[in-house]
Amino acid sequence: MVLVLWTSHLCKCGSSVTNGTLEDRHLQCAESPGVLSEPFQSCYMCKSLRYCVSHCLYAVMTKLEELNKEANMHSSIRYLGYFANLSLLVAICMGLYVRWEKTGNILLLVIFILGLFVLGIASILYYYFSMETASLSLSHLWFGFLLGLLCFIDNSKLKTDAKEEATRYLLLTSILIRTLWSVVERMCGCVRHQPALLTSAEFLELVGFAIASTAMLMPNCLSVILLVFALAMLIVDLRMKSFLAVPNLIAFAVITSLLFFPSLKISTNPFALACYFSRLICDPLLDLYFSGLSVTERWKPYLYGRTLCRRISILPVASIELTFFILAALKLSNLEHWYYLIPGFSIFGIFWLTCHIIFLITFWGFHTKLGDCQKIYYTHRIDNKSLDCVMASKGMRHFCLISERLVFFSLLSTAVLGTVSWQPTNGSFMSVFLIVLPLESLAHGLFHELGNCLGGTCVGYAIVIPTNYCSPDGQPTLLPPEHVQELNLRSTAMLSSVQRFFAYHMIETYGCDYSTSGFSFDTLQSKVKAFLDLHTSDGPRHDTYILYYSGHSHSSGEWALAGGETLRLETIVEWWKEKNADFCSRLIIVLDCDNALPWVKDVRRVSESFVAVQGAELAKEVDVEEADLPQLGDFTKDWVEYNCSLDNRICWSDKGRTVTAVYGISKCWSDYTLHLPTGNDVAKHWMIYFPRVTYPLIHLADWCGGLNLFWMCNVCFKCFKRLKMRWFPPTVLDTGQGFKLVKS
């Protein structure tokens, strides 16, 4: 606003002078030719120039004031970005001018004038034609190009020049203001993070910098273009929050500053390079903390892409890996230290080839499983399924946990081979090495994050016995005929609710058994044991088993079966321990019966098994004028609605509910973690996907992945969680599978 008032004051002053004194004197001069003195000509020109400049400034600021009538904090913060770009523009102009002044190269002057002309066109497109995208694209492309020229056109004569020193200070000022703008913008919540590998601004500045590198000779030019590609991969690595992104950033900064540019044997401007590097790295580096996108949101351009494009992407990846190996092999041409170079390269080269064959096979298998998940996702989009749920239900987590270990060995083999065959005078080798590191880091980060964030596999089995109830003597008795039809309709509704629950949460269905005559103990034993023995298609057991029962029960909680037989909780737990002896899966029993509370209490005494019981209590006495007497099926209806509808209004803590929820968990429930791959799982995975020759390496990866270096911290954390669950059990317990256990 101060600048607007200043320009408006300038315009008023200029107008008064022009309309007053200058016009009178002009008339005098017209009447008396030749009277106009030379000092007055200078004064007249200065005042006319001041008038033109003030008028232009007033027009620009008026336009800005119109665009920012509703000025707020966001627009104020945006001015920091404008000041950063303005200081960078002044620094580039001054730097190019100094280089033209010292070298006399007319091409620099042409580029300088052309750059100003292009930036002027960009401003016109932005302010007068509202072509914001085209204007910003053009300006980012030229910023990258001109900053690249400033980096590579340097001279020792410029070190003592005052204008060159001012250029350096302006570049440093641009770095500081640009960084401050990015930090403040994120702290104030002015940034809306969108899933993207590279933004258009970053891509265009990278392209502009690569074009500027053509001013050098061909070998150096190729090395710099490859380095630009490596920088692009590093930006993607940071934006995806890969596990090894920060070490890659440190390695890139150290190698480029200390080894790469000295190997080119050209004079470079470190201030301009630092300015260019900070402009591109600042935002993705800050987003490691500020970005709130989930894993699948960050990887959306890749995970939701077309299957054919993803499969074709393996070809350039394989080409880059092969190029790195060929460039590394050039080290063998130096036979000065052949006695350790040839054996070392042979050993680590074979290790590298084996690891990267596994790396490519792993990616092909991942694309196959991801393609299957996408097919299911697109067929269930009407149910608002997320790709996370589909991948979890198809065992993608298990696949990623094993693949993470294998890809880590590929990354390790690349680092070892690069160290063994290091070539300090070969810029192309260093550039390709810096491309391969973030590329493999991206693969490792993808598998690592999917393995940690995806839920496990889940299988469910439902048992509904509608036409039996417990008579006072404890024996199951057939219902009167007039009640059979009503109860059958209620039981059918329960089955529909359970099937909806299984389908919504992508739970594999073992079966929904519906019997009007009840089940004998032997029949139910064979069915339940077969259900508890189920495995995934990849070999390991499911992570979660859900057993649903709706029917009548005794006062002790035992299920009432045909022929006067019963099924106790202890019996189911024994079957569970028998089938789950060497695994860490968990069993969740959902009861919709008359007497679920005894099992909820009994399960709390179970140890060494992950078992939970979700039940309900039905009110015995109800005011008929306010509500109906609760019946079997009411809890199932509410619980399924609560877990399958995002806009449900069910509040389990409401007073006066006729159906209240209650759950119980075993002593070690809080220790549960999703199933981690065992040696047998890795062996089965190897037999499915990999050739026999790779088995030793996979066995080594499994052994290294099984090391637990922080076991003491884990023990303390488990004790803390057990105490928390025992003393302060949550009202809503998230199972990690998308549904929750609740209590009123």
Image: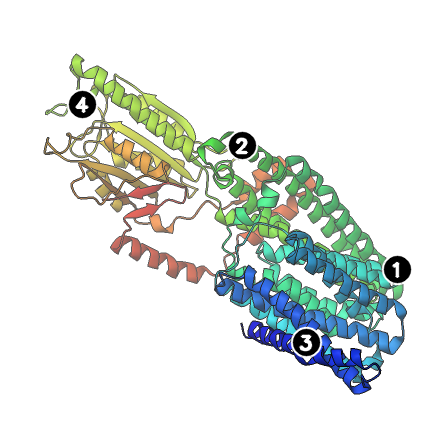
Q: Earlier in the sequence, mark 1 or mark 4?
A: 1
> Left or right: 557 with respect to 461?
left
* Residue at 73%, 75% in the rendered image: 49
Q: Nearer the viewer, residue 619 or 554?
A: 619
Label 1 to label 3: alpha-carbon separation: 59 Å
Name the residue that disc number 2 marks. Answer: 378
Q: Earlier in the sequence, mark 1 or mark 2?
A: 1
Label 1 to label 2: alpha-carbon separation: 48 Å
Name the residue that disc number 4 marks. Answer: 469
Mark 1: few/some/many CA within 10 Å (<14, 14-19, 20+): few
Mark 4: few/some/many CA within 10 Å (<14, 14-19, 20+): many
- In x, y percent, where is residue 385? 47, 36
* Circles 1 and 2: CB atoms closer than 8 Å: no
For the C terminus, give its image quadrant: top left
Label 4 to label 2: alpha-carbon separation: 44 Å
In the image, which is nearer the foreground, mark 2 or mark 3? 3
Q: Nearer the viewer, residue 329 or 148?
A: 148
In the image, which is nearer the foreground, mark 3 or mark 4? 3
Q: Earlier in the sequence, mark 4 or mark 2?
A: 2
Q: Amino acid at mark 1?
A: Met
Find numbered disc 2 in the image and state the secondary structure of the residue it sits on: helix
Q: Which mark is residue 18?
A: 3
Q: Amino acid at mark 4?
A: Tyr
